[in-house]
Image: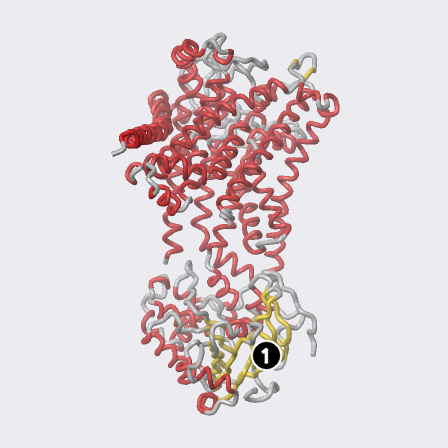
Amino acid sequence: MENAQPQFRRVVRFVSAADRGFAAIVYAGSAFFGLLIVGLCVELVLGSWPSIVKFGPAFIFSSSWDPVASKFGALPMIFGTVATSLIAIVLAAFIGIMGAVFLADFAPRWLAAPLSFLIELLAAVPSVVYGLWGLFVLAPFMRTAIGPALQKVLGWTPLFSGPIYGVGLLTAGMILALMIVPTVTAIARDVISAIPRDLREASMALGTTKWETATKVVLPAARVGIFGACVLALGRALGETIAVTMVIGNRPEISASLFAPSYTLASVIANEFTEATTSIYISALIELGLILFFVSMIVNAVARLMIWSVRGSERS
Amino acid sequence: MTAGTLDGQLLAADDLSAYYGSRKAVGNVTIAFRRRAVTALIGPSGCGKTTLLRCLNRIHEVGFEARVEGRVLLDGADIYAGGVDPMSIRRRVGMVFQRPNPFPTLSILDNTTACVPRGLKGKDRLDAAERALRAAALWDEVRDKLKSSPLRLSGGQQQRMCIARAIAAEPEVLLMDEPTASLDPIATAVIEELMSTLTKDFTIVAVTHNMQQAARVSNVTAFMLADETGIGRLIECDDTAKLFTKPTDRRTEDYITGRFG
Amino acid sequence: MDSPRYARLGRRRIYGTLGVALALCCAAIAAASLLVILGYVVVKGVGALNWEFLTQLPHPVGVPGGGVGNGIWGTIIIIGIATLMAVPVGLLTGIYLALFGRGVIPESLRFLSDVLSGVPSIAIGLFAYAVLVAPLKHFSGFSASFAFMMLMLPLLVRTSEQAIRSVPQAVREGALALGMSNFRATVGIVLPTAMPAIVTALLLAIARVTGETAPLLFTAFGTQFWESNPNHPMAVLALQVFTYAISPYPSWQAQAWGGALLLILAVLILSLGARYMLGRAAKGLDA
């Protein structure tokens, strides 16, 4: 008998001529896709290489950003990026999680749908529009109203001391918060809704109020997914460029006050790349891009791991 | 065990086994299917009858990690031999599925003529569609709406359209996987009648859950059963009349008399 | 009647009500922010919208009038080219992933796609610069299209795969059982069924890049003139809004608001179009 050995089949067999051509195109397209992304990483490393070689690890810890003297240090930008993103995530997490709790467990249907829709729409607003609004509406408001109010109450802390320009860390953080709130709200709401009703009913049967159930029982049960949502939103905030550039003041300095102008990794690239004259300058900027890429990648990976572990393999 | 030898038959399986990964679902089945007759595959759930059917037109291997050992002979040639194009096999061995599966984006006409040989155009295509739809006893019901979507038809009509679609490809064998399982009794009766008339042109192998249907419709019946390890085995295969009145194997008798399954 | 326990319950109820009120406020703040932003854009931008604004070139500073005609034109061309590049690559990769399911290579591609979706757009702009601007020594609309293509790809790939996967297995097997080649079965039968979902994703991807500015800074770069050749620097609406906004000239700032309103309108129309397509996709698979 022929065919004594088992024949392992793949899911798809391409045997006929038309199929072979089809297979070739499909493979080519997919390979190109993969190559694009690998190429992205490679190019970023290649572009930063001169700067990496010249400045080494000191690049990350040095605070001098002096293009004229060809001295480049990323620390102020790292500080600005981290600070604005932290402000953003603190604000967005609070608003987003509270909002998600409301939408998932308390909002009547006629209210939940339009509210959710509006919050989702926040994600669709282009970055430059946020920046425009931040620059001409929020920044003046910060300078005239919010800033002085905060300074009156909390001015004794270094965080809220110093001159109020309107643009600065706090304004940038607030704009960023608005931009990432939809992410937190949408995912948190999904995660909260996915907690089984049994848990809620068991808690209510013990005599807790609905609010206590929502905050002391459901939220802790959903904490992994919610934390994942926050980390994902943080990843988005880290990479945001244009809106931040327009309201952060663009000064490469580290300061304790939230009212002070600052600089982020993305902003400095946006502002200075086309004016970079020397190749080491360009290389330093690309290295900033590389740092940004790495940090985003790690943060996103962590976020996805957390969200997957909660939602199962929802991602097909 | 077989009704006729392997030689000279249009379709036959020789020591055929089917696997899902490492799990053996069908074990060492040897069977010949009589030309221009209806052979029914019966047996309780999980006995491997659908898996066996899907090996006959190489659809089984489309599943993930699904594989086959042994031979299936179509006109004496093994369809699993190296270098054989599964497409060519499936043109000769057609299949109708348990639930009607019309192509959602094509009209009734385009569905029916999806795989006519020689890529006919225009009037020839219409004629081919008419022939197939008449053979499937659906022509009168759809002749005015050939361009409309088949999703508007009833379940029974959709299934008949799928039969027409399979017939239009001019196969030699027609495999039917519980074709009336999702249909009401009237639609079922129409299709059962169809199966008898279709044997004029086609060799039919039909899996059915319904013993009475097998007794009504088939000329030859094959009974399958899963053994202790879950592997589906062919227990008995004989002329329908004989299998249902004087089965050779005790297990066949138990199944037919309703002692299990 | 245990007085303290009742008092505690009452207090807990009050906390509960306050809590819900707080949560409601948070949701309301988020929703209201959108309305506030939209309101400002409409109020401050609608004044700048007129025929001249939509069709004319920018005027030099100090000369009143002028418009963003070249930016609108450039946006259309650049996004058009980006779509032409992104759709085939995205579809083909989606088809590959849907057909080949598990395995090292498919999983790696999915991982890479996820990585790409998290890359900041400015880093993608740097890549486009390194590959298409630096070697050729000039800015171009095409390099911007390249960057946009990369921004659109993850969504297209993921949606194509999901859409093809969700076509019932019976339809694909039915096509194969008739003797169709994989090519015909996938492209002729399965893909058309999956189309509404894919078109939806495409509209959303286009909506996203319409507002994207960062990569444009050193790819398209911008220009004062009409430009239809993608091999030259081109004006893009989002880039013009940015440039005008950070300029010190009130006339330009007013035009920035007008441009912002145009951007928001474009994004809105595309998003609504996507929702409409989503409705059609749901209906298609239901029947």
Q: Position of residue A62 (x, y in %)?
A: 67, 17
- Residue at image point 41% right, 9% down: A152
Residue A8 to residue A45: above or below: below
- Residue B213, located in which quarter of the rendered image? bottom left
Q: Name the chain under label 1.
A: B
A75 and B85: which one is in front? A75
Is residue A18 in view? Answer: no
Name the quadrant of the N terminus of chain A: bottom right
At a point 59% along the width and 69% down the height, the residue shown is B86
Would you say B18 lies left or right of A202 here?
Answer: right
Q: Residue at x 41, y 18 (%)?
A: A138
Q: Is residue B26 left or right of residue B196?
A: right
Q: Mark 1 Cα within 10 Å, few/some/many (few <14, many 20+)?
A: many
Q: Residue furthest left?
A: C1
Residue A73 in the image: state x and y as whole percent.
66, 18
Nearer the observer, C20 or A29: C20
Q: How many marks do you count on the picture?
A: 1
User: Percent from the top left, x then y, of residue C151?
Assistant: 54, 36
- Name the residue type under label 1: Val
**Residue lying furthest right in this view?**
A53
SS for dot 1: strand
Which residue does the numbered mark 1 point to in the structure image?
B29
Residue placed furthest toward the front:
C1
